[in-house]
Amino acid sequence: MLVSVGSKNPVKVNAVSVVVNQIWDDYRVLPVAVSSGINDQPTSDQEAIIGAHQRARQAREYVDADMGVGLEGFTVDTDYGMFASCWVVIQDRKGRRGIGGGGKLLLPEAVAAEVRRGKELGPTIDRLRGECNTKQKAGAVGTLTGNLVTRQAALEHSIILAMAPFIVPDYYP
């Protein structure tokens, strides 16, 4: 089975590999650079699901994979503060689709203020940590939980939720 991931981010690719390995024995995961077609910093569930869907579809079609996986992080502003989360969309060549979302992490107000000013979350966390490219490492969730929840673990959870229609297809006709 060929599973294409609509990203070359090693954290995303590794998360998909870990989950797929728990489900199937004979597989290959292939990262593919594709565009989400949405803003660099999505700010709603709807926008992030659209981006994840477009990544999954493009990744699957680009290499004629059996399954495409799209992962899209986003922020959402609420009356209780700004939260970071992610959506995952998985689509197979038959058109079957699974969608799963992650937990929501309350961002510190200083970080949220930067995102409201149009900054992306990843580079904002980079500045906070004094590091570079943390979204391919600990990310916001790892940084803000002291790595009790790693970015990869958070993504794995969402991928598993999105895999439900493929794990127990009888429940998803």
Image (cartoon, rainbow, N blue to C red):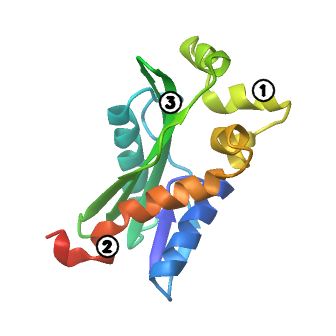
Give the residue drawn at x 41%, y 17%.
Answer: 79
Instruction: Please determine whether, in this image, residue 60 is positioned above or below residue 81.
Output: below
Residue farthest along the bottom direction in this orientation: 25
Dot 1 surroundings within 10 Å: few (below 14), some, or many (20 or more)?
Answer: few
Specify which label sits upstream in the sequence, 1 or 2.
1
Secondary element at image label 2: helix
Local SS, label 3: strand
| Residue bearing the label numbered 3 | 83
**Label 1–label 2 contact, CB within 8 A:** no
Q: Which mark is residue 166?
A: 2
Per the model, the C-alpha gap separating discs 1 and 2 is 39 Å
**Disc on the earlier residue, 3 or 1:** 3
Residue 87 in the image: state x and y as whole percent. Answer: 42, 46
The amino acid type of the residue labelled 2 equals Phe
Task: Identify the residue position indicated by label 1 in the image.
Answer: 128
Secondary structure under tag 1 reads: helix
Amino acid type shown at disc 3:
Phe
Of badges 1 and 2, nearer the viewer stands 1
CB within 8 Å, label 2 to label 3 = no
Q: Residue at x 49, y 40 (%)?
A: 85
